Image: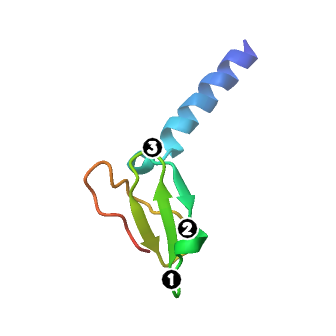
């Protein structure tokens, strides 16, 4: 019984904490394309190329028609 409750809690936490804006995105860093102060990321799902200034993958999914954030 304790295992079942633990699995339910874990599932609920994953649903709450997951970022739905990038759920379908599979960002990969492309260091060859980096610019001064900007990191290049390619989405393996849609092929989008986005540059960020934080060195982290974009926060928004380009597939959903949103512009990727550069912060």
Find out whether the residues at labels 1 and 2 contact each other: C-beta distance under 8 Å.
no
| Circle nearer the N terminus (3, 2) | 3
| Nearer the observer, 33 or 4 | 33
Q: Residue at x 53, y 77 (%)?
A: 34
The figure's colour scheme reads rainbow
| Circle nearer the N terminus (1, 3) | 3
17 sits to left or right of 22: right
Position of 43 relative to 1 (above/below)? below
Q: Residue at x 41, y 67 (%)?
A: 50
Cα separation between marks 3 and 2: 16 Å
Q: Give the image quarter of residue 3.
A: top right
Q: Residue at x 50, y 80 (%)?
A: 38
Q: Pick the quarter of the image with the N terminus.
A: top right
17 sits to left or right of 51: right
Find the residue positioned furthest to the bottom.
36
User: How crowded is the residue under tag 3: few (<14 C-alpha within 10 Å), some, or many (20+)?
Assistant: few
| Nearer the observer, 12 or 64 | 64
Label ID, residue 23: 3
For mark 2, what is the residue? 56
Find out whether the residues at labels 3 and 2 contact each other: C-beta distance under 8 Å.
no
Find the residue positioned furthest to the front.
32
Find the residue positioned furthest to the right.
2
Q: Secondary structure at mark 2?
A: loop
Q: Secondary structure at mark 1?
A: loop
Q: Secondary structure at mark 3?
A: loop
Position of 34 relative to 2 (above/below)? below
| Circle nearer the N terminus (1, 2) | 1
| Nearer the observer, 17 or 33 | 33
For mark 1, what is the residue? 35
Position of 9 relative to 28 (above/below)? above
Q: Nearer the viewer, mark 1 or mark 3?
A: 1
Q: Give the image quarter of residue 70.
A: bottom left
């Amino acid at each position: 019984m304790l295992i079942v409750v633990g699995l339910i809690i874990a599932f609920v936490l994953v649903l709450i904490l997951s970022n739905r804006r990038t759920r379908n995105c599979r960002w990969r860093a492309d260091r060859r394309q980096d610019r001064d102060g900007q990191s290049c990321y390619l989405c393996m799902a849609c092929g989008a190329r986005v540059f960020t200034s934080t060195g982290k993958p974009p926060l928004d999914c380009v597939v959903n028609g949103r512009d990727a954030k550069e912060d």
